[in-house]
Image (cartoon, helix red, strand yellow):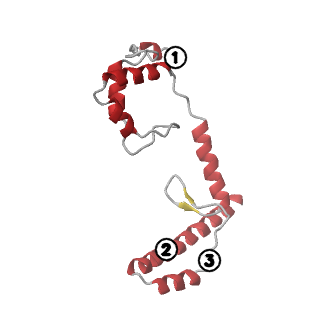
Amino acid sequence: MQGGAEEAQHREVESTETFFEGDVRQLEKKSREGDQAGFYRHLNMIDVEGKRSFTSQNIKDEDGKVLRDPTFIRQRWARWFHKLLNTKSPTIDLHAADKVKRWPTCVPLDDIPSLLEVEEAVREMANRKAVGPDDLPAELIKLFLDGDQGLLREFHAIVVDV
């Protein structure tokens, strides 16, 4: 007895799907043709309003059929989550990280910058930008340090102190 009711409900859902698929094709045709008036006239004719629906969204079942009935949608989600959560987990090799070759760090981070490194950093500073809270433009620092080794050494000493 119960199987007949489910079958009838399933047939009703399929006929509704066919009905809506025809309407969707008609709406797509109107949209492609640029017939906005016809598009909205057809949309109103099938009693679809522009209001957002808070019901379940339609989904496809395993065979690709669109499910619109909330009961069938819930059953499909239940099957999907059952399949997702009840699969065998892959085995993980806990010692895989030990097999990865370790590379030494190239430059220790605590080294004091050399005079050459400070000079290169000053040369690479962007023009027309403030270098920090002192608001000294890079052009000014470059102008004073350009070619004057004495000033460059003083600037290097300040950088090393910081």
User: Is residue 133 among the parts visible in the rendering?
Assistant: yes
In percent of the image, x 49 and y 82: which residue is there? 39
Q: For mark 2, does the 10 Å Cα neighbourhood hold few (<14), some (14 to 19), or many (20 or more) residues?
A: some
Residue with the mark numbered 2 = 24
Residue 151 horizontal side relative to residue 45, left or right? left
Q: For mark 3, does the 10 Å Cα neighbourhood hold few (<14), some (14 to 19), or many (20 or more) residues?
A: few
Residue with the mark numbered 3 = 49
The N terminus lies in quadrant: bottom right
Q: Residue 94 carries which label?
A: 1
Residue 96 horizontal side relative to residue 12, left or right? left
In percent of the image, x 58 and y 40: which residue is there? 83
Between circles 2 and 3, the one closer to the viewer is: 3
User: Is residue 96 among the parts visible in the rendering?
Assistant: no
Up-down relation of residue 51 to residue 7 (above or below): below
Residue 93 horizontal side relative to residue 70, left or right? left
Q: Quadrant of residue 152?
A: top left
In percent of the image, x 54 and y 75: which residue is there? 19
Determine contact: label 1, label 2, CB under 8 Å: no
Element at label 1 = loop
Determine contact: label 3, label 1, CB under 8 Å: no
Inter-mark Cα distance, 3 to 1: 56 Å
Inter-mark Cα distance, 1 to 2: 53 Å
